Image (cartoon, rainbow, N blue to C red):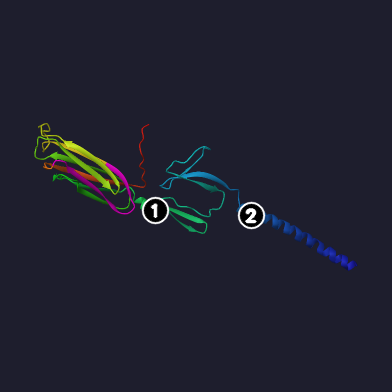
């Protein structure tokens, strides 16, 4: 019995140390789990088409109609990311790399064409007098030309033109005054300017065309200084302008 008591006494401290060690180990695992899973909060943000991010600070703040509202997680692990327009990204494990898309850097290009003339104005029905080819993208397009009374007729002549990009069209017309010898410095007897503009998004490559004609069946007009210019943008908005 004495030997038995010695054995129990010898192992008693070992059992106590083992229990303490398990208690410490358990506390450590809990701390690690807490550090790996911190408190998570979400922050509302607005993402613009060009990739810029705006944080909503005020409680009643809202995103603009052109912005995308989303929630960003603060204090949590990133598991996925949705790229906005104009951004590209790669992922390795939990690391994300963002970069500006090369296509976005190409935005802002300007395409233009001209015809100094003079060229006889078609008469009787619309005829295409100019065409500007464009790649896919969103564009603001403008056109201008000067119509002249080539032969000095003493009659007013009406000219009608249409600037077209697929289904989008802008029309304009003008009356070239009769020759009353009032425009002395102009190389022709009478002249008038005409301008048009439109916005259009090409899903594939396309063309902008300008068609014009004079109503008089007896042609006596010409055009000169014709220009078509298309400016590319990253996005396009075209809304109806109602009366205030």
Q: For the view shown, which residue lies furthest in the right direction?
A: 1
- Please tell me whether the stretch drawn in magenta is mainly helix, strand or loop: strand
Look at 80% across and 61% down and name the residue there. 13
Instruction: Left or right? Give the position of 69 relative to 123.
Output: right
Magenta segment boundaries in residue numbering: 197-216
Tell which tag, 2 or 1, sits nearer the viewer. 1
Residue 35 visible in the current orientation: yes
Q: Which residue is mark 2?
A: 33
Figure label count: 2
Instruction: Tell me which numbered mark, 2 or 1, is placed earlier along the sequence.
Output: 2
Look at 84% across and 64% down and name the residue there. 8
Element at label 2: helix
Look at 64% across and 54% down and name the residue there. 33
Residue 71 percent across, percent down from the top left: 52, 46
For the C terminus, the quadrant is top left
Residue 148 percent across, percent down from the top left: 14, 39
Q: Is 203 contained in the magenta span? A: yes
Q: How dense is the environment of label 1, judged by Cα within 10 Å: few (below 14), some, or many (20 and up)?
A: few
Residue 204 percent across, percent down from the top left: 32, 54
Residue 69 percent across, percent down from the top left: 48, 45
Q: How dense is the environment of label 2, judged by Cα within 10 Å: few (below 14), some, or many (20 and up)?
A: few
Instruction: Left or right? Give the position of 174 relative to 12.
Output: left
**Are the residues flagged by discs 2 and 1 in contact, CB closer than 8 Å?**
no
Residue 138 visible in the current orientation: no
Q: Which residue is mark 1?
A: 101
């Amino acid at each position: 019995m004495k030997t038995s008591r010695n054995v129990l006494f010898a192992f008693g401290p070992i059992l106590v140390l083992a229990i303490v060690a398990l208690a410490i180990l358990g506390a450590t695992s809990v701390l690690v789990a807490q550090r790996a899973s911190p408190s998570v909060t979400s922050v509302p943000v607005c993402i613009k088409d060009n990739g810029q991010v705006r944080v909503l600070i005020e409680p009643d703040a809202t995103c603009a109609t052109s912005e995308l509202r989303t929630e960003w997680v603060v204090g949590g692990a990133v598991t996925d990311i949705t790229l906005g327009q104009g951004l590209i990204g790669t992922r390795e494990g939990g690391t994300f790399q963002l970069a500006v898309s090369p296509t976005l850097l190409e935005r802002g290009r300007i395409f233009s064409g001209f015809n100094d003339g003079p060229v006889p104005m078609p008469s009787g029905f619309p005829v295409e007098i100019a065409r500007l080819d464009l790649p896919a993208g969103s564009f603001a397009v403008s056109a201008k030309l000067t119509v002249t009374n080539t032969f000095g007729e003493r009659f007013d002549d009406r000219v009608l033109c249409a600037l077209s990009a697929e289904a989008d069209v802008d029309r304009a017309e003008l009356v070239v005054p009769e020759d009353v010898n009032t425009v002395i410095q102009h190389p022709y007897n009478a002249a008038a300017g005409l301008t048009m503009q439109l916005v259009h998004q090409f899903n594939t490559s396309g063309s902008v065309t300008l068609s014009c004609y004079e109503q008089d069946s007896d042609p006596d007009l010409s055009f000169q200084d014709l220009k078509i210019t298309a400016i590319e943008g990253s996005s396009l908005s075209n809304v109806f302008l109602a009366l205030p």
